[in-house]
Amino acid sequence: MADSALSIRTITESDLPEFQGVMAWAFLGDPTAEDSRWLKVLEPDRAHAVFDGDEMIGTAGILSREITVPGDRQVPAGAVTVVGVKPGHRRRGVASLLMKTQLHGMHENGEALAMLWASEGSIYRRYGYGEYTTSIAMLTMPTRMPFHPNVHISDARVRQVSREEALPVMREFYERVWRTKVGWLSRVEHTWDVQLGDREVDRGGLTSYRYCLHPEGYVVFRVKYEGDPTGPANELHVRELVCETDQAYADLYRFVLDMDLASKVSFYTAWDDPILHMVDNPRKVRREASDALWVRIVDVDRALPLRAYSSDVDSVLEVEDSFCPWNSGRWRFTVKGGEATVTRTEDSADVSLDVAALGSAFLGGARLSVLRHAHRVVEHTPGHVDALTMAFLGTREPHCPEVF
């Protein structure tokens, strides 16, 4: 419960300097450092601040985005960002007040989904966000790795170009590709400045970005200079690899793996990235997984019909949601021909789960059958968890390539 001395309101333009300072302190940053890129995408009318008297002590914002869900559908979702509490004001209910204000506002506005990247893994499940909605993997592999014989590399030319030449082409590719990738997000103009910021402070000791264009895709990477007296052993840190076709995917991976003067490639990508099945020795590709996008079902009856499903099912779900009580209760979830209907019911529950577990499964990431073994899902009628698991699964694991 929030401290009764606290108040919350939507920010104004005049609040932005203080808002930025609170954010910096919350994340142990330097409040005097000038970094206004993220302010370009911030929507002040969807940003809130918590005050203790006249002192701003908490921040949170929502970015209006779309996300691709199973069925290659693009649906609105609130991208929750810049959530922070000023040091010295922890455990007063500041974050709870921010989360409640956001979720209740989205409910009133008819926005059925919220999403975020969690700075700490123990915070957001209590607010109904589901972890492992998407996962991300750091792949590290040596260069010069051969592909298996069935992988064909075309004679398409890959050109390294300037940032100015690359960006218009990359925007066009991305606009087409994100609509086919579950978990990918729409981008507005200034998103590119945030995602591909290239000031010296952004580089972490690496080079500026290298932009390489293929007729059907692009790759962006930095170089970490390494080597010894025997010769160079540089590392390529891939930031984005976006392709319209499988052929472009193979060509661009071959391009970075064959880069002269490089010995290693690393890339934060999907857990089921096909490169694992293209190389002749997949054991040399090292994977380290982490949670990525967390999804919050704001309205059960409006959210579940937004996506397509893989198989028919008819189950009564008993949902627990103490933070958004309008979701609590029993819902008949019926899928026919991939389309879902969700209605209130008094029938006995086939499956019970909390809203965070439902969020974890929504994009086809976490399996409800696994969550049952984790004591997050309870089956009352035999066979229903497995049937629901199959219905929620997609053809590929969902993946979100950008942090917001």
Image: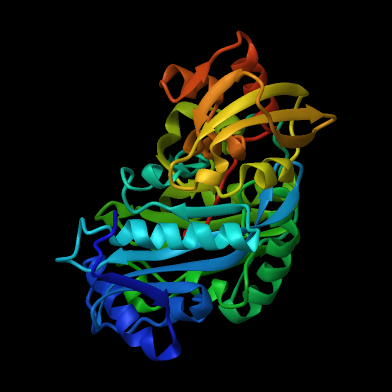
Q: Is residue 227 left or right of residue 318?
A: left
- Establish if 382 lies above or below 217: above
Percent x, y of residue 195 = 50, 68
The residue at the point 51 percent across, 38 percent down is: 355
Q: Residue furthest right?
A: 337
The residue located at (66%, 68%) in the rendering is: 170
Q: Is residue 350 above or below residue 281?
A: above
- Residue 157 quadrant: bottom right
Residue 345 location (% of width, % of height): 68, 29
Quarter of the view holding residue 380: top right
Image position of 17 (left or right of 291): left
Residue sitting at the far top: 382
Q: Is residue 107 above or below residue 181?
A: below
Depth order, front residue of 116/394: 116
Residue 185 image offset from top left, x and y in percent: 62, 58
Closer to the camera in the image, 44 or 331: 331
Q: Residue furthest left?
A: 88
